[in-house]
Image (cartoon, grey):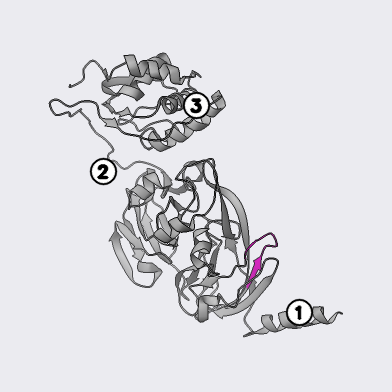
Amino acid sequence: MKLKTLVAAIGMTFALSVQASELPVIDAVLTSPPMVPPPISRDHAAKVVVKMETVEKVMEIADGVEYMFWTFGGSVPGQFLRIREGDEVEFHLSNHPSSKMPHNIDLHAVNGPGGGAAASFTAPGHTSVFNFKALHPGLYVYHCATAPVGMHIANGMYGLVLVEPKEGLPKVDKEYYVMQGDFYTKGAYGEQGFQAFDMDKAIKEDADYVLFNGAVGALTGDKALTANVGETVRLFMGNGGPNLASSFHVIGEIFDKVNVEAGTLENHNVQTSLIPAGGAITAEFKVDVPGNFIMVDHSIFRAFNKGALGMINVDGPEDKVIYSGKVSETVYLPEGSAVQSIPNNRPKQAASSKEDQMLYGKRVYEANCQACHQADGKGIPGAFPPLAKSDFLNDDPTRAIDVVVHGLKGPIKVNGAAFDSIMPAMALSDEDTANVLTYVLNTWDNNGTVVSPKEVKKRRDSGKPLVMEGSAH
């Protein structure tokens, strides 16, 4: 055996034997977000062996936007680690050979200098090992602490470690893992193509994206969290930062219990909980009625303009006593009111094909229409008409152009259902209007009409607001 190999073997043997004990040895279960390892059922401490890898990889941060993330375990946030108070942890941190940077890990659950950062400093293609004992129960952030620390965190290097108390946690029906983070890119929010990290914006704390689980839409659509009526949900919610605090809120829910800053202090009947950068909370609530419940950072422009939005889809029977839904609606317009116009100064995008129109139109829809008409185009009964299989749209695409460009007020019928409200004029460019209408008319079993910018311009010049018969004004 070569001397170098012998020395390495002796060094590894020594590292693994540090603070060795007679505890049973188990391998840690690590999960990628939003999933959580199962609750700990053992009633004794163990030696837990954790093997985690740092990986630098390009992933989508938004539709059509790529970013070089630095990750723990290939996801943002990193893998969720669940251990028990009193466990002795043997932590193996491997840095993938393809990495360009050294990485390490600072676990806020560690009592020791740097939270393990110095002991885990690892060059590409190497593995570092260190040990610690979990002395305090709680939910703790971990993150990379290699210089420049802020850049490593801003690129997605953070996650959560749960140290269960010796007596365990109360049983719940569903547990999920969510983390907020702020991202800084050379291009503005939604600007297409590969976007590099922007240190100047990060220093100024001028985030382009504020995200749940590392991407726009990471917790929406078919990736939404799920629950059933009557179930209790526990959210392990962290904030990686690097800069911004979170005002975490679930629209339509009240947290029955919040472990403030993920410690032992409990608060009850909470509407919105502050989570500092590098902090976390544990929030529990029972879902009483079905529907889509929206998770947001209630610094609300971050939710609707920077991406900090996720969904919990709840199935089950309705309870009209707890929540009736809309029971009536009438139009209210003070004397002299006109159709509202919403400004939009988005730059024009030139589509060269129907496929381009569909792609660009989807983005316009998600930014301007989805909140009301929903991701599946089915609208909200009694409030916003469906665009899916819409007889109103399919019967007269020219009228559809007028609705978007000039607005509509008054009663209409869509697929046999009555709606009486206002559609504001959307100040989109001719290109964006054509794209979004083409997207809608070629999605959800609509008739496949293609709308051109020239048609939109013609209706912009010659059309007018649609005031339907029976309108109050």
* Marks 1 and 3, how far apart at CA: 60 Å
Image-based side of 379 in relation to 40, left or right: left
Tag 2 residue = 321
Rate crowding at label 2 as few (under 14), some (14 to 19) or many (20 or more) other CA atoms within 10 Å: few
Lower sequence index among marks 1 and 3: 1
Indicate which label's residue lies in the foreground, 1 or 2. 1
Q: Quadrant of residue 285?
A: bottom left
Give me the residue at 21% from left, 20% from top. Answer: 471
Image-based side of 126 in relation to 452, left or right: right
Q: Position of residue 410 (x, y in %)?
A: 24, 21
Lower sequence index among marks 3 and 2: 2
- Tell me which segment is drawn in magenta: 92-101
* Residue 62 located within the stretch drawn in magenta: no
**Labels 3 & 2 near each other (Cβ < 8 A):** no
Q: Is residue 172 visible?
A: no
Residue situated in front as seen by the camera: 443 or 456: 456
What is the secondary structure assignment of the residue under circle 2?
Answer: loop
* Marks 1 and 2, how far apart at CA: 69 Å
Residue situated in front as seen by the camera: 284 or 107: 107
Tag 1 residue = 8
Tag 3 residue = 443
Indicate which label's residue lies in the foreground, 3 or 2. 3
Q: Position of residue 128 (x, y in %)?
A: 65, 74
For this orientation, the residue located farthest to the front is: 200
What is the secondary structure assignment of the residue under circle 1?
Answer: helix
